[in-house]
Structures are given as C-alpha cells and as structure tokens.
Image (cartoon, coloured by chain):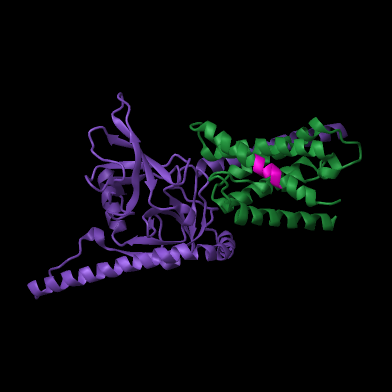
Chain colours: A purple, B green
Amino acid sequence: MRNLFNFLLKYFSVLFFLILEIISFSLIISSQSYQRAHFFSSSNTVVASIYQTGNSVVEFFKLKTSNENLSEENTQLKNEIIALKRQLSAFEMQKSDSSELRLAPETAYRYISAKVINCSTSKMQNYITLNKGMRDGVRKNMGVISEEGAVGIVIDVSDKFSVVIPIINTKLLISSKFKRNNYSGTLTWSGVNSRFASLNDIARHVEFSKGDTLITSGFTPSFPENIPIGFVDDFHIDPSDSYYTIKISLAVDFKTLAHVKIIDYSNFDEQTTLEKSVQN
Amino acid sequence: MLQKILQNILLFVALVLIQVLVLNNIQFLGFVNPYIYILFLLSQPVKQPRMLTLTLAFMLGITIDIFSSTLGIHAFATVFVAFIRSGVIKLFFSIDEGFNPSPSFFSLGVGVYIRYVSVIVVIHHILLFTLEAFSFANFGFVLLKALLSAIITILLILGTQSFNKK
C-alpha cells in the first residue's frame, strides 16, 4: 500500500510538472499577439508602483540629458510660435471673418506628457511602462513620441499606468515613409541592437541615399504624419533581389528615454469605425 | 521551521526586487542580462518534496514574468529546471540517507556546487532566451546571448555564495 502511495506521489509530481508547463506555455502563446489584453503586465498597480519607487532613484541620473533635450525643444517651439504668429497676423489682415477656417480632421490631437518608469532594451520583446493611465485620458492604441521621434504604441492601460510596445519589440510593425519622396514601407526590428531597425520592402526603383530621414506615414490613426523615426544608415541590394535591405538608425535612444508624450487623437474612433465598416 | 519559512520568503522578495529593479536594467555589452533570481530555486533543500519545489518555481517565474511583461516565459524555464534539479544533483553527488542539505559551497563542496549551478543556469538561460525570441531565426545570436548571460549569472551566484559563511 505504501509503495503504491509512493508511486502515485512520484507520478503525480510528473503530472503536476506537465500541468504547470502547459499553463506557462499557453500563457506564452496567448501573449504572442500584442493586441491581446495583457492581464498581468507591468501596468498592474502593485508592479508599477514598485517600478515607480525604483525609478525615482534612477531618474536623477538622467536629469541632465533630458534637461538639455527639453530646453532644445523649448527654443524650437518658441521659434515656431513666432513664425505662426506672423502667419496668423498676415491671415487676419486678409480676412476679417475667420468663421470659415476649419481645422483638417486628421490634425485634431493633443499631447499627454508622461514619465517612463520602466523600460527594457536588451530583450526581443521590450516594453515600456508609463506613469499615466486611464484617469489621465490614456487609451489603447494611442501613439507615443519623445522629443527625438516616434517611440511606440500604447497596448495596455490601467487606472494610473500604461504599457507601451516600443519600436524595439519584434512584434510591432510601424508604417513609415521617406521624407523626400513619400515612398512608404514597413519598419521592423530584428531584436539584435536597440539602435537599429530595418526596412525590407522598398522596391529597387526608389531613389534614396544614406542619411535620408524616415518619418511616420500618417496611415495609422495612432501617429500623425511627419514624426521622425530614424535615418538611413546603410543599405544594399543583391542583383537578384527586387527589394532593398535598409538599415535604419533609430531617432530615439531607448536607453536614455525618460519623458514621452502620448498622442490623444480625438477622431480616432470615428476614423477606425469608418475604416472597419468598409473592410467588413 | 518558522524561521526557515521566513528566511525563504525574505530571500524570495529580495531576489525578485534585485532582479527587476537592478539586474533587468543592466545591459552589459548591450544585450547581456543576468537572471540571478534562479538562486532561490538553487538553494532549496535537496530532498524537498517535488510538488513544493515545482510550486515555488512556478510562483517565482510568474512573479518575474509579471514584472517584465513577458507572461509565461520565466515560469516555463524555471519550472523546467526545478523538475530536473534533483536529477542534476544526483549526477554529481550522492546524498546520504537522512541527510537533507541546502546546496551551497559547504554542503556539496566547491567543485560539485560550481558544476551543479553551471548546468542548471545554462539550461535555464538557453530555454529562457529561446522562448523569448520564440523563433529559430537568429538562433546563433540567441544562443550567444544566453551563454554570455549565463556566465555572468553563474559568477554572480558564486559571488554571493562566497559571502555566505556557514
């Protein structure tokens, strides 16, 4: 009897092992597609608040670079304001009645500024946690940018925190185009180096050169047009290929990322429902 | 007994915090990321009931997973090494009847302990990095990453053990 009991115990531990492995593996499979809800992710309140405490120490060391970036952006914005004021006064002189002026619908967005409280760069599937959530107006699928350029897309939101899937995650594909000729392609990240990504669907006839700027295409409602993504670092094409292999050096250095802006596009729902109704 | 449990809980929390707050931010050479939390599993008593070891391993793995938004990956790898652990110990060391040591330099001997840690950590890391990539494209690079990270993890674990005077 005792032997039987021992045998069952031994057998049960193997069964238990298999059950645990199957649970883990199905969790891995279900989190393979990034659109799926992440129930247990770093937007979880307990996890995020631990990260926030840890980050308050680290942030001190990033202050200098982020200050420099901010002041640079500040000057740029001030210049823009001056230019815009000049244009506005010119228009006001032309037209006394401004009621006919209407904003193009795709430009109706505002920014929510947020702080990065956790960011990995060394993995294949990197994620970023931000300290803004639903109560600050953050929703799924919003684009995230920093002063340097595009960062990623919000995939999960809790009340106070949100998780972003950055460009340096092998699951995210970003629609991009060349600034100089509007030719668009899909940017992918191979998982090797956090400074570089690749662009593999640019046809042979397209003209471009090293140093060309790659910007967001504006075809996805998450990002407005004209946000820098990166620069052409190197490219080559085999005689038999019809597409270039292009190495893009990313505009954002994810290792020093500290402050970001979340793009709140007010016509998001209207645009996506309209697009979906056509597809179905 | 109670002291043992408290000690284990403390070790668990300390290792998880060190892992997610410090080590996950260290990127030596840009991609080497040591996973020292496995030390918790490595230092469980040799003859601990298997079900308990497996449960602890799953809890440890899933905790790390929640913190790094990689659901299931750490849990899978950690449960796997928890399962093969007693086999690996038996490979290098014969345990006397009625004797149930927690593996360390002193209970197993330096040579055996280093071999035991190395085998477990290397298997754990290779499994972990392969699952993280979830494809065999770039497998050479994944393997290189896994092995370099494993070396750092082994050195860190042996470093903490040399402080442990008992």
Q: Residue at x 54, y 44 (%)?
A: B31
Quadrant containing the N terminus of chain B in the rendered view: bottom right
Q: Is residue B76 left or right of residue A190?
A: right
Percent coordinates x, y for residue B65 in the rendering? 59, 49
User: Residue A122 colored magenta?
Assistant: no
Q: Is residue A78 left or right of residue A36?
A: left
Q: Is residue A103 visible?
A: yes
Q: Is residue A16 visible?
A: no
Q: Quadrant of residue A186?
A: top left
Q: How many marks?
A: 0
Percent coordinates x, y for residue B6 in the rendering? 78, 58
B50 or B46, which lies in front?
B46
Q: Quadrant of residue A19?
A: top right
Q: Is residue B131 left or right of residue A257?
A: right
Magenta stretch secondary structure, dominant: helix
Q: Residue at x 31, y 36 (%)?
A: A201
Percent coordinates x, y for residue A50 in the rendering? 59, 62
Percent coordinates x, y for residue B147 in the rendering? 62, 36
Q: Is residue B112 left or right of residue A141?
A: right
Q: Residue at x 44, y 46 (%)?
A: A195
Q: Where A8 falls versus A80 (above or below)?
A: above
Q: Where B61 falls versus A94 (above or below)?
A: above
Q: Which residues are magenta?
A: B151-156
A84 or A27, which lies in front?
A84
